[in-house]
Image (spheres, grey):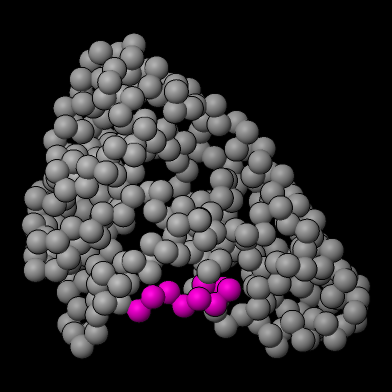
């Protein structure tokens, strides 16, 4: 709720008053705050004398994405060397595919199209816009350096692990559901493959994550199609133990190889079911005057600030510009 969030951020700011701090607002849905009044009150109580970094995206692209969004399940999933891969299927399925567009754009205003409303509440004297294209794989490291320079922050560490974190496709289709909150854990036990030993090690299959910085990422040992976006983490000590037992090492390696192949195949299978395209969204608005006028009224208001201060970003939103010409 909004009050709980305020208390949490206030305590963190007080406890870290001697450091550079940032408050991240990752969601705007009213269910996360209790009510619109509580949400707006929370925004209004944020510090007004600090700069604001706002990430924005072509609104028509947001609508297309919104109708295919699937939320993470937030469940710990653990496998052994004898586990059936199909037990993972419920965790990597999407929560619905459709070509139907529902003309209820107030939901987007509440959750996605609140740029100007948010700025009015926070009243920051400095707004630094980051377009969605700026955080694309080929641009993100430069964007992070620019932000660091603009706000006198430390630039991201340029280790291979941190480069992978920034450049990875974090929302890798349906796989995002599987490790939305927790990594997929594999416990490789010697007894599971018939060895008379209590030896066991743990591996973690996940999106790239900073909290695994002390682990080895051994994804390069496997033939994984999505190796840029998936990590197989193991501690250095555990990896040494695993390599000391040739039979367990081979069984674990083979299992992980097959597991990664299964995950990639399933992800592609679910992604292939996505049938809604940007052109479908635009065609919907061409044929629905009421929905078109409703969305235009929302965007005319919410994009007022960015149009005034970063017209170059808006002029690069090809789908929005096409919508505006309808």
Q: Is residue 26 left or right of residue 244?
A: left
**Where's residue 48, x and y in %?**
8, 65
Camera-side residue of 124 and 313: 313
Find residue 281 and report its horizontal and vertical position in percent.
40, 24
Q: Quadrant of residue 224?
A: bottom right
The magenta stretch spans which residues? 154-162
- State yes or no: residue 160 in magenta: yes
Residue in the picture at 20% in, 78% down: 13
Residue at 78% of width from left, 86% of height from top? 241
Total numbered labels placed on residues in the image: 0
**Residue 74 drawn at (x, y percent):** 48, 57
State left or right for residue 313 relative to residue 65.
Answer: left
**Left of 323 or right of it: where is 226?**
right
Residue 321 is inside the magenta segment: no
Q: Quadrant of residue 198?
A: bottom right
Q: Position of residue 129 (x, y in %)?
A: 26, 54
The residue drawn where x is 30% and y is 77% is 153
Q: Please tell me whether residue 271 is drawn above or below residue 231 in the rendered image.
A: above
Q: Quadrant of the C terminus?
A: top left
Prevailing SS of the magenta stretch: loop
Please tell me which residue lies in front, 296 or 267: 296
* Image quadrant where one finds the N terminus: bottom left
Snapshot quadrant of residue 196: bottom right
Q: Is residue 276 visible?
A: yes
- Residue 229 in the image: above or below residue 236: above
Whether 306 is drawn above or below 272: the answer is: below
């Amino acid at each position: 709720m909004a009050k709980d969030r305020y208390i949490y951020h206030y305590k963190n700011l007080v406890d870290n008053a001697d450091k550079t701090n940032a408050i991240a607002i990752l969601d705007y849905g009213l269910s996360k705050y209790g009510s619109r009044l509580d949400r707006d009150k929370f925004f209004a109580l944020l510090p007004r004398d600090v700069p604001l970094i706002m990430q924005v995206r072509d609104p028509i692209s947001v609508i297309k994405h919104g109708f295919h969004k699937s939320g993470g399940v937030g469940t710990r999933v653990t496998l052994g060397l004898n586990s059936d891969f199909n037990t993972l299927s419920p965790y990597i399925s999407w929560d619905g595919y459709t070509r139907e567009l529902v003309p209820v754009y107030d939901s987007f205003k509440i959750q996605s199209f609140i740029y100007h409303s948010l700025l009015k509440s926070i009243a920051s004297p400095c707004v630094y816009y980051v377009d969605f294209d700026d955080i694309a794989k080929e641009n993100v490291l430069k964007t992070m350096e620019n932000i660091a320079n603009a706000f006198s922050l430390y630039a991201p560490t340029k280790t291979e692990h941190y480069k992978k974190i920034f450049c990875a496709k974090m929302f890798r289709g349906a796989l995002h559901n599987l490790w939305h909150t927790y990594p997929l854990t594999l416990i490789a036990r010697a007894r599971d493959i018939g060895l008379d030993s209590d030896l066991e090690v743990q591996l973690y299959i996940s999106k790239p994550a900073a909290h695994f910085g002390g682990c080895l990422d051994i994804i390069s040992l496997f033939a994984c199609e999505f190796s840029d976006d998936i990590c197989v983490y193991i501690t250095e000590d555990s990896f040494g133990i695993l390599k000391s037992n040739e039979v367990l090492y081979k069984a674990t390696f083979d299992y992980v190889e097959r597991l990664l192949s299964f995950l990639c195949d399933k992800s592609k299978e679910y992604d292939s079911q996505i049938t809604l395209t940007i052109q479908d969204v635009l065609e919907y608005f061409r044929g629905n005057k009421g929905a078109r006028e409703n969305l235009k009224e929302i965007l005319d208001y919410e994009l007022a600030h960015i149009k005034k201060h970063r017209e170059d970003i808006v002029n690069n939103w090809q789908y929005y510009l096409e919508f505006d010409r309808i």
